[in-house]
Amino acid sequence: MGPVLGGVAVHHDDLTSLILPASTLNYIDGFQKLTPHITYEGYQALDPDRSLKISLRISNPYGIDISITKVYMKTFCHEHDVFLGTATGDSFPLRIPAKGDGILTIVLQFTREGKEDVLKHVDADDDLLVDLRDMTLVIQGIEASYTGDFEVGPISLK
């Protein structure tokens, strides 16, 4: 018990450093500041009434290879702000080399309201723009959440 109390006394202003050394904290801080860049690559209509497969290019800004093991997000119609459904990653793990790129495939399953919105676009012969929101990725075993919208499309539903 004495060594623990001694450690707490020495690190009373910064208890985190008692558990994680400064070098690890700097690495985590750098990891949080650098985020992978995501670019829309394309889509495949699996079943326009039920689901879409969307491809995204993810760049790895880190000096080490990364492995993405889980991805999920909410999707919305960009034009009408209708919740289309939840999208999840496909074909894991996705390994991306240091400073390299990888293609992430996500599958969007439509809700009933999402299906109705998509069919409106089909009937109007309009392309669909999808906003990805509340994206969560598990990278190297660390769950990272990203807020804000990321627009993908245009997706032609003809």
Image: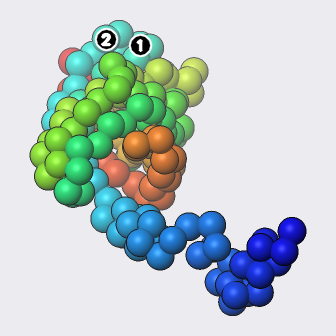
Q: CA distance from mark 1 to mark 2?
A: 9 Å
Secondary structure at numbered mark 1 = loop
> Which residue appears at 77% of the width and 87% of the height?
9
Q: Of 138 and 116, which appears nearest the observer?
A: 138
Instruction: Point out the image quarter for the C terminus.
Output: top left
> Disc 2 designates what residue?
46
Q: Quadrant of residue 95?
A: top left
Query: Left or right: where does residue 88 sit relative to residue 67?
Result: right
Disc 2 residue type? Leu
Secondary structure at numbered mark 2 = strand
Mark number displayed over residue 49: 1
Q: Quadrant of residue 45?
A: top left
Q: Dot 2, how many residues are within 10 Å of its Cα: few (below 14), some (14-19), or many (20+)? A: few
Which tag is nearer the camera, tag 1 or tag 2? Answer: 2
Residue 92 position, x and y percent, is: 36, 23
Residue 126 position, x and y percent, is: 26, 32
Disc 1 residue type? Asp
Asked whether the residues under the numbered discs 1 and 2 touch, taking CB atoms below 8 Å apart as contact, a structural biologist would say: no
Q: Dot 1, how many residues are within 10 Å of its Cα: few (below 14), some (14-19), or many (20+)? A: some
> Which residue appears at 34% of the width and 26% of the height?
93
Instruction: Point out the image quarter for the N terminus.
Output: bottom right
Vertical order, 129 against 48 (above or below) = below
- Is there any visible trace of residue 117 in the rendered image? no
Q: Residue furthest right?
A: 1
Query: Left or right: where does residue 100 sit relative to residue 121?
Result: left
- Is there any visible trace of residue 24 in the rendered image? yes
